Image: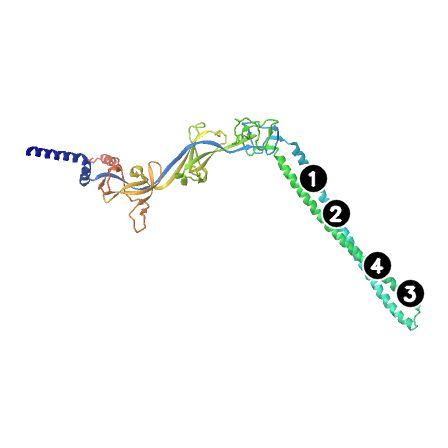
Amino acid sequence: MHRSIRCRVSGGLLVLAALSATGCGHEEKSRYTSVSKPQPVQIVKPTPRTIVRTVGQPSFIESYERTSIYPKLTGYIEKWNVDIGDKVKKGDVLAKLFVPELVEDFGTKKATVVLDEHRVELAQKLVQVADADLKASQAALAESRSILGKYTAEVERWDIEVKRLDREVKRNVVDPQILLESTNQLKSSTAARDAAQSSIDKAQADVLSREAALAKAKVDVQVAQADLAVAESEKKRIEAWVGYITLTAPFDGIIVTRNANTGDFVQPSSGDPTALQRSPNLSPSGLAAPIYTVDRTDIVRIFVDVPEQDANYVQIGTKASVLARAFSDEPISGSVTRTSWALNIKSRTLRAEIDLPNPESRLLPGMYAYAKVLIERPNLKALPASALVRLGDQTYCWLFRDGKAYRTEVRTGITDGDWFEITDIKREAAAKGDDGWRPIDPSDQVILGDLSILAEGEPVEISTPEAEKKPATASKAASGNPAG
């Protein structure tokens, strides 16, 4: 019985030993391995590097400008001059409308301008006449005043003479007949003086009348000039409308749509209502068809919507390439010409445009293209992807310090898939309130390789890669060293 118990106990111990060896063998092995022989690792330091990231997406080639020509007037197409595929220059006449009532109205406005110009000339001449009349009245007034002075002097003279003769008659020195004659002369001079005064009053009134006539004539000139200005403004307005009768090319380009036909009735709101529903370049409502559509193709452009994470790195001049297989199997080099600066609120992307010269118009609008934007960031402190571990939203690296491995959180920036920009690394806080984030130091030694076998604070040793050993061996063989 005791022997049976001993067997059972021995069996249980063996089972426990077996379970212990099976379940904890890795831990024991790791522990003993770490004590007896440190894990060999390779080391890399953050080095300045140019990281190139490519942002590409399908796109379409579009003309630099596209303008749909609609009529400003309601009328009939009298004549059309160009068809699809025709090259046009800026200002070339594409078509003419027939709007006779507008032409007649324009003729009336031009005649009105001529009439008002004559009225201005007549009013100006009337001002000259009124001015001459005023000067004549002023001269007559001056003459009347001089005559008044003459008769006033005569009255004073005969008044003195009559008084003198009156004294002499009373003394019986002079005959009364002489006094009577002098008295009559005084009365005559007084009457002449009064008549001269009346002439002055009349001349003054005439001057005032002439001044008023002159002022009125000047006002008439201003009114005539105002009427002329209104007539000229109306003429220019109608002339502008008449200009809409002629439909012209807005720039050098190619006609890509024509809905013009002789005699078509066209309207500003719908363009050519007789155009077929499958006609290209209809308005979004499908109810308006342009008379013509003109494309500017000496330059074409391609749109790239850059994701938000790359938006800050895309600027004017950023390198780009466009592959249009219908044109060539080789990509066309270019650069970002402009950006929208602000992100699209719905797609969270930045619109970037690439302009390509197209002097022979071989790149056709609507061609499928694949556009790439090359984001180059020079002199970045970077680590290879094999030196980083990502856990959730956090990224870590293993630092080699004092012969041991320590896991440290880092912040990353731009990446090309193989290399990552390292912007900051978590250090020990220096003071209260310090979050510990610091720029990574170029002297930091970062562990490469299979990072899953590392443990915090575990001793490790730096191993020399085989690629670095071979050159040394070859050097010894070349030197003839026997040890080689």
Earlier in the chain: of badge 2 and badge 4, it is: 2
- What separation in Å lies between label 3 and label 4 (alpha carbons)? 21 Å
Q: Do the residues bearing badges 3 and 4 touch, measured as CB atoms within 8 Å?
A: no
Earlier in the chain: of badge 1 and badge 3, it is: 1
Considering depth in this image, is 319 or 202 the residue closer to the camera?
A: 202
- Above or below residue 368? Residue 202 is below
Q: Name the residue located 62 percent from the left edge and 36 percent from the top edge.
A: 241
- What separation in Å lies between label 1 and label 4 (alpha carbons)? 53 Å
- What separation in Å lies between label 1 and label 2 (alpha carbons)? 21 Å
Q: Looking at the rendering, which quadrant does residue 47 occupy? A: top left
Q: Describe the element under mark 2 as helix, strand or loop.
A: helix
Q: Position of residue 256 (x, y in %)?
A: 53, 29
State the scheme by which the image is colored: rainbow
- Above or below residue 83? Residue 397 is below
Q: Describe the element under mark 4 as helix, strand or loop.
A: helix
Query: Label 3 belongs to which residue?
Result: 181
Dot 2 amino acid type? Leu
Query: Label 2 belongs to which residue?
Result: 126
